[in-house]
């Protein structure tokens, strides 16, 4: 019953009249929307420009949902919700495989009522989609189903690049080393898994590179290698301990109980090495983001579910957490989504002439998804520019036929800092102000 209530809560955002949020959710939905409208299911694009920062699988599922259910918010969110539910189910399956069926059910409930997975499921990101694949990879590796492990890791590469394979590989290799179970036969099996994963993922990457020359170098060298080793990519500059509070806070309420699961049996060793190897690997990376740790959070749920105390008292803890999540979601969810969305701008641009340049703050591009098709077709990527106050203030002269969009609650403090807008005309667009110099 607890798990059913938690699952219903995960689906609740589909019923709330909450818009797509910026920066990621609205951008990704607009890319999937363009995939449906333009018919190009190979190269993800935003307003005609190839989008190189994420692979294709999540876009495929989102575009398929939009095509099936229409261009609405629920259709854009549905795939993320499905992947979140698959994350719950596969966490339970992995725990049942390592321990027993009862621990599997408890682990699924623990994962469903954990802070970080629940929060990220409300605004689906690509990391949500790799959790089922990394969970399944560990199931198949434990059962020595090497071909299936390669298949799901290949799907994870199509979803988020090498992140899933790196976390699974680091965790499983560490387990084999600690238990002195590593043999040449297992090394060969591991190479087979990697080869199968490459066969699954390679065709799209090769075609994508042919359609967007330089993509492979950009994505795997610049984004992956340099992002890991240097501070040249986005999400850099975080302290080394960045993930520690995320694991502790994001793993609540169950993180406080995993210390009770300290037995030395092989299943415990595997789950511990999975969690700790992921934490070390991500800590060493120069690029750090909240979402990166998500594929390791099922380990927290499984370790908690394996502790005797949780097995006796998990229901009241899970019910209390679910009640808190439900209250927070319905009390604050819609208003927070509105505050981080640019949907109101769509109504404005749907009823007025599009200017040559639209300046937006903080990558507020979610309005594109809500534009009428005939209006959206008039836009191109260079027409929307994300800028800061400092960049606008330095524009001399200010571009001709341009408008500036800014959240209304920031207008009174930001506009005085931008001399070119001192005498601009104000138009109101819901929660936004549109400034016409």
Image: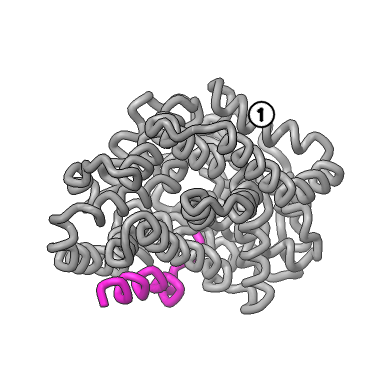
Mark 1, residue position: 222
Question: Left or right: where does residue 178 sit relative to residue 60?
Answer: left
Judge whether residue 196 can be spotted in this image: yes
Q: Nearer the viewer, residue 425 or 362?
A: 362
Nearer to me, 107 or 284: 107
- SS for callout 1: helix
The image shows residue 349, relative to residue 142, as above or below, that is: below
Type of secondary structure dominating the magenta stretch: helix
The structure residue drawn at horizontal position 50% and vertical position 30%, both measured from the top left corner, is 287
**Which residue is painted at 61% across and 32% down in the image?**
224
Using the image as rendered, state which of residue 437 and residue 31 is in the foreground. 31
Name of the residue lying farthest toward the top: 230
Give the magenta range. Answer: 1-20
Reply above or below: 81 against 267. below
Question: In this figure, what is the number of numbered marks?
Answer: 1
Residue 167 in the image, given as x and y percentages of width and height: 49, 39
Q: Is residue 174 left or right of residue 206?
A: left
Where residue 108 appears, as percent x and y from the top left, is 34, 63
The C terminus, quarter of image: top right
325 relative to 138 in the view: left or right: left
Q: Position of residue 308 (x, y in %)?
A: 16, 55
């Amino acid at each position: 019953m607890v798990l059913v209530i938690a699952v219903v809560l995960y689906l609740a955002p589909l019923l709330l009249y909450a818009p797509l949020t910026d920066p990621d959710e609205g951008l990704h939905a607009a890319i999937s929307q363009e995939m449906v409208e333009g018919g190009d299911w190979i190269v993800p694009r935003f307003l005609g420009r190839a989008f190189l920062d994420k692979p294709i699988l999540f876009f495929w599922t989102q575009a398929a949902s939009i095509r099936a259910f229409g261009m609405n918010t629920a259709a854009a969110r549905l795939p993320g919700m499905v992947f979140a539910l698959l994350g719950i189910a596969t966490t339970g399956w992995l725990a049942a495989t390592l321990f027993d069926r009862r621990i599997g059910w408890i682990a699924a409930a623990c994962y469903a009522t954990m802070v970080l997975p629940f929060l990220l499921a409300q605004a689906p990101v690509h990391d949500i989609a790799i959790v089922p694949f990394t969970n399944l990879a560990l199931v198949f590796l434990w059962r020595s189903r090497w071909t299936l492990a390669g298949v799901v890791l290949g799907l994870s590469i199509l979803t988020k690049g090498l992140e899933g394979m790196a976390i699974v590989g680091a965790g499983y290799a560490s387990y084999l080393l600690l238990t002195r179970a590593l043999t040449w036969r297992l090394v060969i099996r591991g190479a087979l898994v990697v080869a199968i994963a490459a066969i699954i993922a390679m065709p799209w990457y090769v075609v994508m590179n042919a359609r967007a020359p330089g993509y492979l170098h950009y994505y795997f060298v610049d984004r992956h290698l340099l992002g890991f080793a240097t501070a040249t990519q986005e999400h850099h500059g975080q302290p080394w301990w960045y993930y520690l509070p995320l694991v502790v806070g994001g793993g609540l309420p169950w993180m406080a109980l995993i210390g009770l699961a300290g037995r030395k049996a092989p299943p415990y060793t595997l789950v511990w090495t999975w969690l700790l190897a992921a934490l070390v690997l991500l800590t060493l990376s120069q690029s750090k983001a909240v979402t990166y740790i998500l594929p390791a959070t099922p380990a927290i749920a499984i370790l908690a579910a394996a502790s005797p105390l949780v097995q006796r008292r998990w229901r009241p803890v899970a019910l209390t957490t679910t009640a808190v999540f439900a209250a927070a979601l319905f009390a604050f969810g819609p208003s927070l989504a509105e505050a981080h969305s640019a949907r109101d701008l769509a109504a404005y641009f749907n009823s007025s002439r599009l200017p040559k340049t639209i300046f937006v703050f903080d990558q507020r591009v979610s309005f594109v998804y809500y534009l009428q098709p005939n209006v959206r077709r008039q836009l191109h990527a260079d027409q929307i520019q994300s800028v800061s106050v400092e960049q606008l203030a330095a524009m001399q002269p200010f571009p001709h036929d341009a408008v500036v969009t800014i959240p209304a609650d920031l207008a009174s403090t930001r506009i005085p800092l931008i001399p070119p807008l001192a005498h601009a005309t104000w138009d109101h667009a819901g929660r936004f102000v549109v400034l016409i110099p």
